[in-house]
Amino acid sequence: MSVVHFDPYHSDEVPEKAMCGTVGIWEGSTMHNEFSSATCWDLVTCKRCLKQRNKLTKAVKLIEADIIKGMGEFVEFCKDEL
């Protein structure tokens, strides 16, 4: 059984690397079909992800804050164009 990595933006596409930094095991490998990820920390079994939990959680918050800021700037831009 493969480990379950943390992935706050879970999709059907297999990433090139896990958020914890684990790389190179997906493409062209038998492990490609075994890659698992979860958005819920209770399901994560990857030791690297669990060790970096606080760091990864903070990174996600920063990414989401940046996205929200960008959306607000886009709204303001659209208002100015009308």
Image: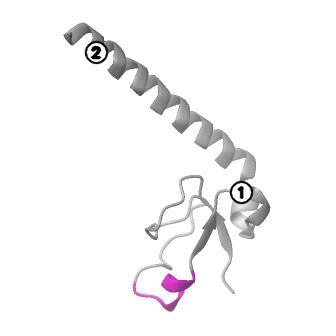
Q: Which colour scheme is used?
A: one colour
Residue 25 in the image: above or below residue 5: below
Q: Which amino acid does label 2 sit on?
A: Phe
Per the rendered image, the range of residues in magenta is 28-34
Residue 66 versus residue 13 in the image, above or below: above
- Under circle 1, the secondary element is loop
Q: Mark 1 points at which residue?
A: 40
In the image, 6: left or right of 71?
right
Dot label at residue 19: none
Is 32 covered by the magenta stretch?
Answer: yes
Give the quadrant of the C terminus: top left
Could you tell me the amino acid type at mark 1?
A: Cys
Say whether residue 47 is left or right of residue 79: right
Secondary structure at numbered mark 2 = helix
Q: Which mark is residue 77?
A: 2
The answer to whether residue 55 is magenta is no
Whichever of callouts 1 and 2 sits on the residue coming sooner in the sequence is: 1
Q: Where does the image place residue 23, in percent across and percent down from the top left?
A: 51, 70
Badge 2 crowding class, 10 Å Cα cut-off, few under 14, some 14 to 19, many 20 or more, is: few
Q: Residue at x 61, y 67 (%)?
A: 37
Quadrant in the rendering for residue 45: bottom right
